[in-house]
Structures are given as C-alpha cells and as structure tokens.
Amino acid sequence: MKDRLRLPFAFDVERLQADLRQLEADAWVDHFVKQNYSGSWSVIPLRGPANATHPVMMIYSDPTCTAFADTPFLERSPYLREVLAAFKCELEAVRLMKLTVGSDIKEHRDHELSFEEGHFRIHVPVVTNPQVEFYLNGARVIMKEGECWYLRLSDPHRVSNRGDNDRVHLVIDGHVNDWVKSLFTGAEAAVAHV
C-alpha cells in the first residue's frame, strides 16, 4: 500500500467549518506531547477512550485502548457525525487538530498507525492554506479543504504552518476491515491509472 492515498470523498467545506465554529470558542486543549511541536498545536476530542471524562484524557489516541465513545463535542456537531458515518468500520480516536500560524510539528512517527498493521489515520482538512507544508517520508503532501487522505503515519512525517491562518484537520483513526481494504485498494488502483 502507498504511504498516502487521496480517498474518493469530498466533504462539504462550509458545513465542516460551521461545525468547527460551534465548537472552537472554548473547546481547544493543548496537545500533551510537547516535545513533538513548537508553537501551538491543540485538539478538540470528538471520540476518545470510553471512560475518559477529562478533555486531556479524551484526546489521547491510546493504541492499547479497546473501547472508544463519542464525546459531548461530537454530539454538538451534526455534519461531523455525518462525515464519520461515511466510514463503514470501527472508529477509534477522532479529533479536530489545530496548528496555529508559525507553528511546527517536528518529525516523528505514530507507531502502529498503518494499513499494514490493521490501523489507519485519515486527514480531512477543514481549514488550511497553501503554505501548510506537510511532509511524509520526505515528500510533500498537499491536501485541500474537504478532501480525504490516508497517510501512513508510522512513517516519518512533519508539518509547518507558514501561512496566514491556522490549519485545522479532522483526524480519524480506525480499524482496517473489508470495507476499508476495498476503499483503499480502489483508491490505489485509481492513482495507478492516472
């Protein structure tokens, strides 16, 4: 499987951003892995460990967790619920992740987050700009608002926001099942025929 695939979804940017506006006034929590970034990188948890009640625990994408549940933030987000319903598989952590202007996510790996290991991470840009520099395995990935991308983030990756506005992505973790295999195989075949 390729390290990046644009999947055949095009989500409504206006509706994504409307849900974001409903949440962002008071919901952002600083990402707790401070050594992985400089500047400001924060999260709104939409799904998290089932027993988590504190927002910091809700944002943790624990690879050993076996039970995930929707958070109150997702309950207030009708279109984000529609987006998640498009994925016919078991979802784990789901978060909105904001990287502010001038901030950097340092190169790192998210272990066990690969199709090959049975887990995936999807990125849906909600707000972005052309100066967001996302590098995976040393090659830039340009993602536009409303697009849907699989990225094999067990590989080295980094991000810099050099633009004039904050970058916010919907980040979806889930389990590979037959539906996911078919989706990814179809997306890979489509790329091969271009």
Image: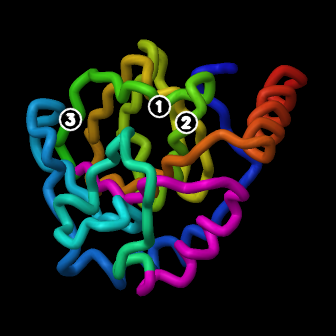
Q: Which residue is mark 2?
A: 119
Check the picture and name the quadrant holding the C terminus: top right
The quadrant of the rendering that contains the N terminus is top right
Instruction: Tell me which amino acid carries mark 3.
Output: Asp
Instruction: Check the image and report above or below for 102 versus 19.
Output: above
Alpha-carbon span between mark 2 and mark 3: 25 Å
Check whether the beta carbons of the residues at disc 3 and disc 1 lie within 8 A of each other. no
Name the spot of residue 189 as percent of width and height, x first.
85, 27
Q: Is residue 93 magenta?
A: yes
Mark seen at residue 104: 3
Q: Is residue 6 magenta?
A: no
Q: Residues within 10 Å of mark 2 (few under 14, many from 20)?
A: some
Q: Label 1 vs label 2: CA separation?
A: 5 Å
Relative to 72, say whether 4 is above or below. Answer: above
Q: Quadrant of residue 35?
A: top left
> Spatial distance from mark 3 to mark 1, Cα to Cα?
21 Å
Q: Which stretch appears magenta?
A: 75-99
Residue 113 location (% of width, % of height):
47, 31
Using the image, determine if residue 37 lies above or below residue 117: below
Mark 1: amino acid:
Leu
* Closest to the observer, 124 or 121: 121
- Residue appearing at x 20%, y 49% in the figure: 41
Q: Position of residue 95 (x, y in %)?
A: 38, 59
First along the sequence among labels 2 and 3: 3
Coordinates of residue 80 in the picture (x, y in percent): 53, 72
Q: Quadrant of residue 184?
A: top right
Q: Quadrant of residue 137?
A: top left
Looking at the image, is mark 3 or mark 1 nearer the viewer? 1
In the image shown, does 9 or 164 lie closer to the viewer? 9
